[in-house]
Amino acid sequence: MAKLLKRKDVPVKYTWDLSLIFSSDKIWEEEFRLLAAKIPEKEQYEGTLKNGAHPFLDALEWQLYMIRTIQKIYFYALLKNSQDTKDANYQTLIGKAMSLYAKIAEAISWFEPEVLSLPDYLLTRYLEELPKLSLYQHYLEEITSQREHIRSAEVENVLASAIDVLKSSSDTFEKLIDSDLKFEDIENVDGNLVQLTHGNYTSFLEVTNRKVRKAAFESIYKSFEQFQHSFASTLNGEVKTHVFSARTRNYTGTREAALSGNQIPELVYDQLVTTVNQNLSLLHRYIALRKKTLKIDNLQPYDLYTPLLGEAPIKFTFEEAKEKILEALTPLGEDYIDNVKYIFKNRIIDVYENEGKRSGAFSSGMYDTEPYIL
């Protein structure tokens, strides 16, 4: 029976190249040490924002340097851990990165409250006196727009120091999903026993053989059911984290807090829900059509993804898919195509599933990294 490859056995050309962030773990460790050593520098910047445009700029750029550098350090560790969550070395790396992240957040927690303590006319004067500050005008406007939700320096310091603790429920959930959860093997359409994984589950829901679809569905949820109380506990912890953060930052509720990061009014959310509810009849018609076309009396969740007209006739290898993508995007111009080719050529994508690899998929990057895709 075919099993998932171990990380070391995945062909290199189908893995992402994280040396574009740090050339080695040793270099990462050195950058980690240097950044940690800069934390005490906060003493020379805290309390100086009122002293003029130049001291303001120096403090601003110091805290932005701290943010950008820890993001880069954390992101490297996150991607290393994501490619194999069972690797103890990268479990240690992500733990160290998260711990330093909390310390950096604590070290710069004074900055936003101190910005908000300055009168608006003084910020305006700084921007007029020092043209370089105009680069950060939007950033400063974002800070001032959150005036009601940024607390005193003391409270911000406490919240920053609690980052690691508040992530514990989320971290436990990810470990359960990516490292500990195992699914029963199932028979594929050819009658061969295969390993069911997060990565291939969807493909089984798309086959026309209903027995295979049902087996995949039941195998997945049987495994989740075994840990239902653990998952409920992690969800409860995550909800409490959001409630705590929303209350501490003076939001009316967790929904407002969640939307505020992208400056989206709650009205937008309400309108979306209203629009969906007003058009549910279209979804009901589609489900009825699917039930009729598939000739299924009792439509189940595992019947919602299989093609209505039979198996999808086209399948592509990864190499073929790359060519099709370039062909499809050609109308967007050479510059766009060159950027896509860069992603393919420089191994920004981690393609295939392997043992311990983080479930799901994401495209993410920090200010100083490539937009990596898992």
Image (cartoon, rainbow, N blue to C red):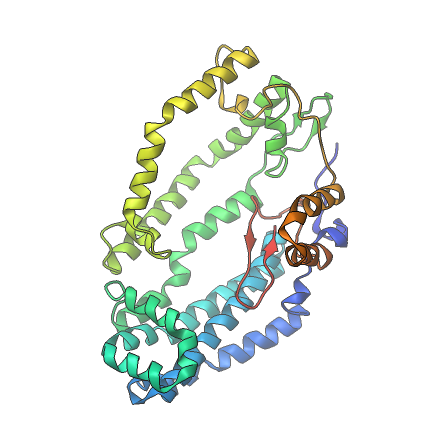
For the question of whether residue 276 can be seen, the reply is yes
How many discs appear?
Answer: 0
Residue 63 shown left or right of residue 119 in the figure: right
Quadrant position of the N terminus in the picture: top right
Depth order, front residue of 348/275:
275
**Residue 317 sits above or below residue 332 on the image:** above
Q: 150 and 217: which one is in front?
A: 150
Residue 248, horizontal then vertical, whole percent: 25, 60
**Residue 135 location, x and y as percent?**
43, 75
Q: Nearer the viewer, residue 122 or 188?
A: 122
User: From what the image shows, is residue 234 above or below residue 76?
Assistant: above
| Residue ID at (46%, 15%) | 288
Residue 329 placement, left or right of 241: right
Q: Determine the residue positioned at 67% across, 54% down.
A: 337
Q: Is residue 151 left or right of residue 56?
A: left
Residue shown at 45% from the left, 75% from the top: 64
Q: Is residue 84 visible?
A: no
Q: Position of residue 173 (x, y in %)?
A: 47, 46
Residue at the image position 71 percent from the left and 60 percent from the top: 346
User: Residue 306 versus residue 219: which sits nearer the camera?
Assistant: 306
Q: Name which quarter of the figure residue 163 lies in.
A: bottom left
Residue 249 x/y as whole percent: 26, 60
